[in-house]
Amino acid sequence: MANTITATISFDYQGRHFEPSVVFDLDDWVKRSEGEMPDFVSAIAGGSDFGGHSHEVEAMEAADVLLSNPTGMADRFYNFATKEFNFTGFRKTWLKNVYFSQLNQINQRHLDVALVEDSPQHLLMLDVLQMSKKV
């Protein structure tokens, strides 16, 4: 199942009320980002009838982004009471889950022992993996 969250921006412009939204692919965000917050305004503007430099986009930038409808693993990182999403925690867990089997194979090949999930060695390998992406 895909990990998604819906981002909605509610705003008024020239006497009209707008609530454009986009279903945001969190898997793709983790793969493409270094942990920076998603640009929901651009994603919503790109998926709606608003131009990239329109006055509506400026109004959207001044409004709050409302998050809802998490799917997949994302619901574990969404606070349904406050409507907040823990992007850092989601990203860390997603990476840990995706890379564990690959890191386990490397560990077994070099040390001839299975990697223990969440062990200091596992977390060290994840940090090295992330560091290598930045170089």
Image (cartoon, rainbow, N blue to C red):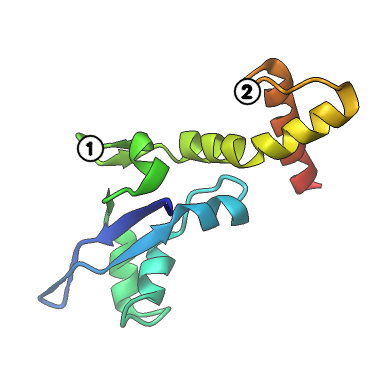
User: Observer-nearest residue: 3 or 60?
Assistant: 3
Residue denoted by label 1: 80
Left or right side of 19 for 94: right
Percent of width and height locating residue 114: 74, 22
Q: Of callouts 1 and 2, which one flags the residue occurring earlier in the amino acid sequence?
A: 1
Please count the marks in the image: 2
Q: Amino acid at mark 2?
A: Glu
From the image, state whether disc 1 or disc 2 is nearer to you: 2
> Residue lying furthest top in this view?
120
Q: Amino acid at mark 1?
A: Phe
Percent of width and height locating residue 31: 60, 53
> Residue lying furthest left in this view?
15
Residue found 43% across the figure and 68% down from its top = 42
> Residue lying furthest right in this view?
110
Q: Examine the rendered structure and indicate whether residue 20 appears above or below residue 103.
A: below
Under circle 2, the secondary element is: loop
User: Observer-nearest residue: 121 or 84?
Assistant: 121
Give the crowd class for mark 1: few <14, some 14-19, many >=20 residues within 10 Å. Answer: some
Give the crowd class for mark 2: few <14, some 14-19, many >=20 residues within 10 Å. Answer: some
Q: Examine the rendered structure and indicate whether residue 119 appears above or below residue 102.
A: above
Q: Examine the rendered structure and indicate whether residue 135 appears above or below residue 103.
A: below
Under circle 1, the secondary element is: loop
Percent of width and height locating residue 38: 47, 54
Residue found 33% across the figure and 40% down from its top = 75
Residue found 20% across the figure and 67% down from its top = 19
Residue denoted by label 2: 117
User: Observer-nearest residue: 111 or 128?
Assistant: 111
Left or right side of 48 for 123: right
Q: Quadrant of residue 11?
A: bottom left
Is the Cβ of the residue at disc 1 closer than 8 Å to that at disc 2? no
Residue found 87% across the figure and 22% down from its top = 111
Q: Examine the rendered structure and indicate whether residue 37 appears above or below residue 22.
A: above
